[in-house]
Amino acid sequence: MRLDSGYIFRWALLATASWGVALTALAVLAGPGSAIDAPRTPAEIVSGPPTSALPPDHPPVGSSPKATNEIDQSRAEAHRKSAGCIECHEGIEDMHASTNVVLGCIDCHGGDPTPGLTMRKAHVAPLHPELWQSSANPSESSVLLNHESPEFIQFVNPGDLRVAEKACGLCHGDLVKTNQHSMMNHGAMLWGAALYNNGASPDKNYRYGQAYAADGAPLRLESPIPVTEAMTRDLGILPFLDPLPRFALGQPSNLLRIFEKGGTRQVELGNPNPFEAPGRPARRLSERGLGTLNRVDPVYLNLQKTRLNDPHLSFMGTNNNPGDFRSSGCTACHVPYANDRSPTNSGWWSKYGHQGLSFSADPMISKKEKGHPIKHQFTRSIPSSQCMSCHMHQGNLFVNPYLGYTWWDQESDAEHMYPKKQKNPTEQEIADTFRRNPEAAAARGLWGTPEFLEKVAELNPKLKETQFADYH
């Protein structure tokens, strides 16, 4: 019998309809009966039943309110944490320009915001008040922060990496931890290059760097991830960095420097040279080999003594020179200081000059005292002049050439840089100059004084062979 296409189609349609009726019956019989009693809503028809709904017989679940913190507090709560502060500091800028960040003064700085208190009771006192004569950054503070309490460091600079986890870390915890391992903090490249290239350390992979705990103790930085030899070889990732050892334990080095002029003959052990400058052993090596008839390695000694504090985030700038005004930690970059009058280097910040003066609306901050930030406010618009407050070592390398500068050769246009009559400085004048500029010529030249350096760029129209920057 021949089957046409219409006959087959009719049988297929009948079979499909029967199968659909059977499935519907199964769904009705298998369900709890609610589908018959309560018709589905349009939303249920479109999206189906809620997948996270609890069974009807499940006991009620208690809901606990979300705990509030300093980040999501109300403005009234933040005001209570600032009430006593703004009695004196009325008009001060919010540290965060964004209205989405709601913080009280003590959330970051600490202290006591109770209204009506005297400054002595409201502020956190330093351990060394003789070195903190005002709210300005101390001049030539060097490692002073290592000898202050964590509470005071947080009070004057919540962004310091010793305490930033308590303040900046509330929102930026990962960034704070990352910056602890940043080369801008530990400076391993600088120390490693000096030690390895002078033979003081046999490790080509840098081993030493600096970082400090809240109490000033030196820290060993360990990588937060396991580091293999291949990662160190191919990517330069180091497993750890140790603090510098005591300089007396260093291996005497500088093998080739024995051929330099000015070295002296070896001295006998226990019979020192009384004419040798204290703390400055003359260049000499033993005829018997490394480490004999010698005191300490001069590279370790120099690193321990100078620490080159200004290129590292652990300490503040010297705050006594145009180009050296800055704070420490996160604040070193994100809170600009007046360092350079050049619009090329400072952008719109150049209008604030280069003397580290404050232009804050805070009536309690002196507008004539150096060592203050321009404003009490963070920024991500960081000018090149702020970078240069660290990245000027060594002056003929690093960032200086990117701005078109190198160190002055101490000869070009010299008639403008030296006194008309030769100056013969006293020992005290030499010592004072060396604290600011460790080169012998500075004590005899005009640039040995901060007052001259502040205005040296104003000589540029008169100069023929060179042009000076506005930062030094």
Image: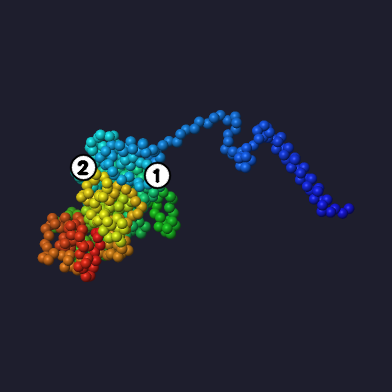
- Regarding residue 466, the answer to whether it shows in the image is yes
Type of residue at label 1? Answer: Asn
Percent x, y of residue 273: 15, 57
Residue shown at the point (59%, 39%) measured from the top left: 51
Mark in front: 2 vs 1: 1
Q: Is residue 250 above or below residue 170?
A: below
Q: Earlier in the sequence, mark 2 or mark 1?
A: 1
Quadrant where the C terminus lies?
bottom left
x, y percentage for residue 259? 23, 66
Q: Residue at x 19, y 55 (%)?
A: 435
Q: Is residue 63 left or right of residue 4?
A: left
x, y percent for residue 356: 24, 53
Question: Residue 383 appears in which quarter of the rendering?
Answer: bottom left
Judged from the image, the secondary structure of the residue bearing numbered disc 1 is loop
Residue placed furthest toward the right: 1
Q: Residue at x 62, y 37 (%)?
A: 41
Q: Nearer the viewer, residue 144 or 421?
A: 421
Residue 100: which disc?
1
The mark found on residue 129 in the picture is 2
Circle 2 residues within 10 Å: few <14, some 14–19, many ≥20: few
Q: x, y percentage for residue 199?
A: 30, 60
- In the image, taking residue 350 as reference, residue 171 lies left or right, namely right
